[in-house]
Amino acid sequence: MTRSHNPAPQDYELTTVPAGARRGFWTMLSVMLGFTFFSASMWAGGTLGEGLSLTRFAAVVLAGNLILGSYAALLALIASRTGLSTHLLARYAFGSRGSWLASALLGGTQVGWFGVGVVMFALPVQVATGIDTLWLIIAGGVLMTATAWLGFKALTVLSFVAVPAIFVLGNLSVGLAVDEAGGLAALAAIQPENTLTLAVALSICIGSFISGATLTPDFVRFAKSPRIGVGTTLIAFFLGNSLMFTFGAVGALVYSESDISKVMFAQGLIIPAILVLGLNIWTTNDNALYAASLGFSNITGWPKHWIVLANGLVGTVFALWLYNNFVGWLSFLSSALPPIGAILIADYFLVARGRYQAFERAVLADVNWTAVAAWALGFAAANLLPGIPPVNAVLAALVVYVAASHLLGQAAARRAAA
């Protein structure tokens, strides 16, 4: 009897993750820390460090990561209970075809992050080595696409290598920077020339990574239990994200540079700088490409591994253009993606009351226009209302979705069906 062999990885892109494929605490913690070791958070940390005193910086990072971590932890709880990705969860709230809106927004923006990350890797390495930028972009794009193609197992192996290396080398660099500044007391005595308001500082802190937090279920669906899923998510957002902000802030204060790799270049740590830069961006980029491909798989029904190759090609080819339009991209992310996560949270906890039909047997609407309208109003709230845009987006979308679902009788119908 001939046994067929399929070399493609199994990542359950269109099904529930079975119990036999679930992972334990240390694997999930490593993956989630690799996910939150995010270069753009260092840029945001540098902006905060230049505009806040050290004590206000610490308070803003604590408050911002409390909000981010709570948002991500609620999504982690849903994913670890159901074993479903963000995109499959969106089918319950938005409908089978309605979920394509969420998948297109999430998938498209993550391909954009991938392109930005490839250039963020290539430019400093070109300065350090003299290798042509184009070849570095191609090499980075190919390597990062490869691990995303191999799936969750490759993400795990990469994270086990990258997380300790980034942690040790990043803290070594920060220690050297603090010594150069004259110690912690001297660093704390530095006062910003242009002070940021609390609302602006929190907007920067939360907005820098709320797009990633919305994709938490894509990874936490592999957790063996809700306790592991939620616990590792909270640790990652408080430890991983806070470290990235701190690396950026210290570098900005001492060297006027928020990128830890460039700080390490200035300190003469060339090889460690390339290691930290490469591993940091690699863990971010393969997660982004992996999540994007889950989204486009939801839309097309095609296997994730082929979509990874297409997305990696697009992200690499348009990398320089995406990098040069980074600021506008970040503004769009902080407005468009949080309402999706808010609607998923509201649908599961407040409309369905934590009772979803099993995915393989669920009878789902084609398009839930209530969810689409709530997303649009959340997006509008982020751009039109005063305050903290991503928080406005989450609250507006959540309130509108829950209120409309009850007024239209959808909540009662969903609970009866479950």
Image: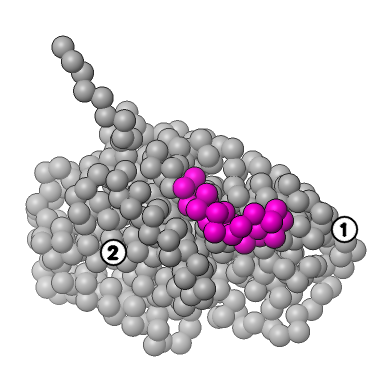
Residue that numbered label 1 is attached to: 179
Residue 235, placed above or below residue 158: below
**Residue in the image at 71% along x and 75% along y:** 50
The circle on residue 104 is 2
Residue 372, placed above or below residue 311: below
Place residue 73 in its image quadrant: bottom left
**Residue in the image at 60% along x and 80% along y:** 198
**Kind of residue indicated by mark 2:** Ala
Q: Main secondary structure of the magenta part?
A: helix
Q: Secondary structure at mark 2?
A: helix
In this image, 173 relative to 258: left or right?
right
**Residue in the image at 45% along x and 42% along y:** 147
Horizontal and vertical percent for residue 107? 34, 60
Whether residue 330 is visible here, answered yes or no, is no
Horizontal and vertical percent for residue 328? 47, 77
- For label 2, the crowd category at 10 Å Cα-Cα, with few meaning under 14, some 14 to 19 and many 20 or more, is some
Horizontal and vertical percent for residue 234? 51, 51
Place residue 220 in its image quadrant: top left
Q: Tell me where the magenta segment starts and ends, as one range.
A: 121-144
**In the image, is residue 128 part of the stretch drawn in magenta?**
yes
Front position in the image: 199 or 137: 137
The circle on residue 334 is none
